[in-house]
Image (cartoon, rainbow, N blue to C red):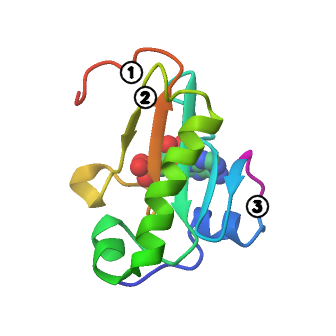
Amino acid sequence: MTYDKNNIFAKILRGEIPCKKIYEDEYVLAFHDINPQKKIHALVIPKGEYVNLDDFSSKATEKEIAGLIKGIGIVAKKLDVSQAGYRSLVNVGENGGQEVPHLHFHIFGGEKVGKMVT
Ligand code: AMP
């Protein structure tokens, strides 16, 4: 699986294009989605170069995996959606509808998210 260093999230990670940052640590960067599908729509991405969840699950270190999962929880708390609930999902590949080839977890909340799959 070849990582495209010119994908939009790689550019955001390098600071070449701006984002509305929510949280950043050693392992993750989280920012608001540019085209929100719900009142709250955030993206949490690993700092490492991983195309998608398959790539990440097979190549990432234990620390990177823990860091990403912990990061999602931290971001949910920062967005104040933990109590009321939210949905986190990952699109993988063509059938999954993945548009940006750098792994990202979506976080939707701030209102009822609706049916799981449409
Ligand atoms: P996916 O279809 O799972 O690959 O989701 C890609 C998401 O990235 C979409 O929800 C887009 O709105 C979002 N997106 C694309 N470009 C940007 C950007 N520059 N800043 C923030 N979000 C973006």
**Residue under the image location 47 percent in, 73 percent down:** 64
**Residue 102 in sight in this render:** no
Residue designated by label 1: 113
Q: How many marks?
A: 3
**Residue under the image location 54 percent in, 34 percent down:** 41
Give the distance between the C-alpha atoms of the residues marked 1 and 3, in whole angstroms. 29 Å
* Residue 40 vertical placement versus 103 (above, below): above
Under 8 Å from ligand 1: the CB of mark 3? yes
Residue designated by label 2: 86
Q: Amino acid at mark 3?
A: Ile
Give the distance between the C-alpha atoms of the residues marked 1 and 2, in whole angstroms. 7 Å
**Residue 80 in sight in this render:** yes
Element type where label 2 sits in the image: loop
Q: Main secondary structure of the magenta part?
A: loop
* Residue 25 vertical placement versus 55 (above, below): above
**Between discs 1 and 2, the one toward the N terminus:** 2
Residue designated by label 3: 17
Q: Nearer the viewer, residue 56 or 35?
A: 56
**Residue under the image location 60 percent in, 75 percent down:** 6
Q: Amino acid at mark 2?
A: Tyr
Quadrant position of the C terminus in the picture: top left
Residue 98 image position (x, y, % from top left): 36, 54
Between disc 1 and disc 2, the foreground one is 2
Q: Nearer the viewer, residue 54 or 74?
A: 74
Residue 84 image position (x, y, % from top left): 47, 19
For the record, the magenta segment spans 17-21
